[in-house]
Every structure is written in C-alpha cells, then in structure tokens.
Amino acid sequence: MNFIRRVLSTVTGIIVFLVICFFGLFLIGLLVGSASDDVIQVKPNSVLELTLDFPIRDYADKTEFKEYPFLNEDEKNGLFNIIDAINYAANDNKIKGISIDNNFIIAGISQIKALRNALLKFKESGKFIVAYADIFTQKDYYLSSVADTIYMNPVGMMEFKGLYSERLYFKDFQEKSGFKMEVVRFGKYKSAVEPYLANKMSDENREQISIYLNGLWDEIKQDISKSRDITPERLNIIADSLLGRNADLAKASQLIDRIAYHDEYINAMKQAVGVEFTKDLESIAIDDYSIYTASKLKSNTSKNKIAVIYAEGDIIYGEGDEETVGHGVMNTSLKEAREDDKIKAIVLRINSPGGSALASELIWREIELTKKVKPVIVSMGDVAASGGYYIACNANKIIAESTTITGSIGVFGMLPNGKQLADKMGINAEQVITNKNAVTYSFFEPLDEEQRAFIKEGIIDIYELFTNRVAEGRHMSQDDVKTIAQGRVWTGIDALSNGLIDELGGLDLALQRASEAAEIDDYKIEEFPVYEKNLDEMLSDFGLVKAKEDILKEELGEENYRILKEIKSMSKKKGIQLLFPYSLEIK
C-alpha cells in the first residue's frame, strides 16, 4: 500500500509540475512570438556595426520542438546571414556605412575572405567602411584591411607576421607512458596519425604543409595588397621584421591610416554621417540587422526554390547534430529536398575535415540518388577534406574558395593500446575464446600480425573504393586520382589545377550554377538540416524533469523494471514473430 501511495504521489507531483511548466512555456512562447522581427528598427543615418565577437559558422542552424513549436529557433547569425545583411545594407537608405570595431574574430580564412568579398561589393554603393582596434589579430586585420580608413589605438598592438602550423609528436611519450596508438594507414601524406609513429615531422608532411600555408599566405597578401596598395613583397618584409607591431610602426608601414582613441573614431563617424558631436551616433549591431534583413528577404514570392544543405563538422555514423555531420540528418535532408517538387536544385555546402568512412559512403549514395532527380552543386568552405571530399566528389559541379583546404584522399585506422601501461600498473588481461579470431582487438593486447593484416586489408579496400568514387565523379582514371591522392591536401587553387574542383568561388557562385543547371531565373533559398529537439529529454538531462522510466526504475529496481519492460514488449507483438527464443545479454 505504501508503494502505491508513493507512486501516486510522485506521478501527481510530476503532472502538477508539467502543467506549471507547460503554461510557463506557453506564456514565454507568446512573449517571444509577440517580439516579432518588426521590433528591430533601423533608424535614419545609422551605421552597421560589424562586430563579430562570436564563433562564425556557415549555418546558424534551425531547431524545431515538435511538442512546443513556439520554442522553435531559426538563428540568423551564420556566415551567409551576415553576408546577406551586408548586401542588403548597400541599398538600405538608412544605413550610411559600416564600422568594423574591435573584433577578435573566430572564423576560418575562407570565411573571412567571403566576408571581405561582400564588403568589397558593399563599397561599390559609395558608402563608407571604417575599422578600429585596440589589438589587431592577423585575422582581424585581414578583414579590416578592406576598410577606407583604418584606425588603431595609440598604445595598441598588431599581429602581422605570417602563418605557421605546429604539430606535437608523441612517439617517445608512448614508450615512456606505456599508452600507445596502434596505427594502420594508407597514403604517405596521411599525416593525421604521424605524431604517433615518429618524433619529428616527415619530409612529405613538411612539404604539403609548407605548400598550403604559403598558398594561403599568398592569397592573404594579394587581397591586402589590393586594398592597401602595398606590394606583396613589401608585406613580406613587414611580416618578417614585425613592422606593424605597434601603432607608430603600423602607420609608418601604411598598414593603418590613423592613430586615434575610440572616442575620436566615433566622432569621425559622426562627421561622416553628418551628426553633431554632442548627439549619439545611431547604430545597429550585425546580429540584429541580420534578423531584420532575413524578415525582408522572406518577401520573395518565387515558387522555385534552391535547397542549401550544410555539412559542417566531423562526419559521424549516426543521426548527427549542430556540431557533427551525421549520415542520418544529412540523408533525411537530401531526401526531403529531392522529393520536394518546388526545390529545383541543391547546393551542398561543405565545411568538414571528414570522419567516418561508412557515413561518408552512405551520404555519397544519397547524393547519387538525388543527382538522378535534380542537380547537386557543391560549395566548399574552409575545409572539405578526406570524408569531406568523399561526399563532394560525385556532385554535378564542385566550387571552392581559393583558400579552401581539400583533397586528403587517404585512409587510416587507429586503435588505443594499453598493454605496457597495464603491465606497469600490475594489470593482466586474460581471454577465453571459442574461435581463433574471436578477439579482433583488445585494449590490453598489442595487435598481432594477422590482426594488423585484416585491418590493413579493410583500409586498402576503403582506399580503393574512395579513389574509385573520385575517379567516377571527376571523370578521371583511378591511376590519375592516385597520383594526387595518398592523403595529400591541396588549396582550392591547386585543386582547380589538378581537377579535384571545377571553379573558384563562394556560395553565391554555387547558387548561380545551381539556378543555371535547373534553368530557373528567380528562386528563394530553403536551408537544411532542421534539427528536431525533445524538450522533455533536454530538461531531464539537466535534472529538471525525471522521465517516467527513471521513476519506475527507482521504485521497482533495475532488474524488475527490465522484466516489466519485456512483458510490455511482448504484449504489443501481433502475428508470427521471427525472434530469438529468449532474452540474452552477452558481455
């Protein structure tokens, strides 16, 4: 009787709590819903503040709560939302100019280049762009160099020194600690696993890193050279001698135009806009203006659509989320876009270093199915390498930025091994087996030659499949693909030369090529993926709500709950079943 009372009181408490939560969330939803985009207003003579003090992602993500739709999120602070806002501002009479103020930008080089290109286009409107910083990081300066006038704090600092890459090597550490990584790889340039095999960088790896670093640096220098009218050779001298490290040196080197305090910078903008010094300067932050711009762009009434599907993050086998590219959510997005008659073409935007070979193959297959129905154009961001290139290689056309890192057509396998560490700790693992190869891998045993051979066989099979997929997709022979494969990475410029991509450009060019392939002139964009969330699970994760299963487990105990679950499962089965005759858990 006491057990029933406890259960009933617990259930009653949960129901009351959930009712209160529901009405609370409903009220929040009404408030959020009433705070429409129209609340964001742009006042006359405003300056658009391009302060990018948050991590820049290509896609800001769409999130849907099926049970609570008023909580749905559609952020507008992604890279292309910002670019849309900059483009819109060029023709917005209320916006007089753009201020790039004290950024510590967290973005890739290709993302910054895309922003620079949008700002260069904005300048064609005749409106001003100015920039200010107390401290210019190298990325900040690359973006700010597009400005008409660059200001720097009198005691400020600047980082302008060229690019570098640093790798840590663990071979000796593994020997000393006893914790090792068992590595099998294919491709002499597949350097991701090199730190576990050696104590210094291989010549092949040093060569490829040097080539792509210098390629990126050349692009940065060329862009700054055009904006600042400083020769690339002179920029190299400035970088070598750190001739921009303080305000006086930066001005003498022509990297900046004025040495001033922030209040003087604001006053200069007031003068440019025509506002008295005693009055406030009207401004609007880029994240607010991006929301405002998105609401205006929704007015596009075209019946035609182009889907933009974002693949951003490591590729994993599974559903995926905002941080990873899962084959589940990617294939759902591709299928939905493929089956929507209003969507005439698909642009796959890739910003991924790769990951699971199996997941990459599954996404490749879905693209192959989609291509039979409508064109698929790939737009590459900062990186589209290894698995990131795998899911691109069969597209109708591949477009990359000149600063994109791509290729890395190679395969590796890596397994942790703690045999020596276990020996040092006095731990011994013993196995009992029924068949010769029952133990394919154990953390406590080193790989024997037969096990290593099996793993290598699988890796070679994947490499052959990978290079074959590239050969078919790029209309090359497999031998030609292998000459540029071996795990080697390439910049967008080099990838264009060796046939891995078709054109240099950004998402705008990819959209143009998609519209041409679909033979449509006007269209609106629909973005994917849409991530579905379960609010109850999220609250449960934070310990705010206990799921009914958790309550029953507490009251009945784990074993009794498992029996209850089996009985419930059996009661739901209808008709003939092909089932194992009893429940068995093998560990």
Image (cartoon, grey):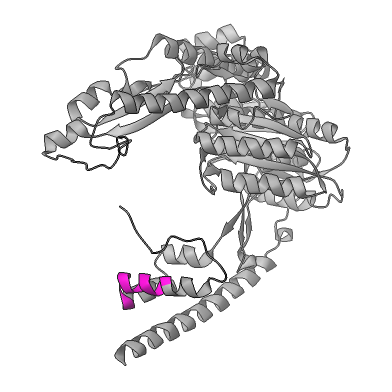
Number of numbered markers: 0
Q: Which residues are magenta?
A: 555-566
- What x and y, as percent, mark residue 354? 52, 32
The reply, left or right, for residue 563 in relation to residue 126 is left
Residue 573 lies, with reference to residue 100, above or below; the image says below
* Residue drawn at the location 32% of the way across and 70% of the way down: 558
The residue furthest bottom is 1
Asked if residue 283 can be seen in this view, the reply is no
Which quadrant of the figure has residue 121? top right
Q: Is residue 563 magenta?
A: yes
Principal secondary structure, stretch drawn in magenta: helix
- Residue 30 lies, in percent from the top left, at 65, 72
Give yes or no for residue 1 being in the magenta stretch. Answer: no
Residue 310: tell me if it is visible. Answer: yes
Q: What residue is shown at x 63% (from left), y 41% (from top)?
A: 310
Q: Along the line of sight, which residue is nearer the eye, 407 or 254?
A: 407
- The percent coordinates of residue 97 (x first, y second) are 72, 37
Front residue of 566 and 38: 566
Residue 29: percent from the left, percent from the top?
A: 62, 69
Instruction: Establish if 455 lies above or below 444.
Output: above
Quadrant including the N terminus: bottom left
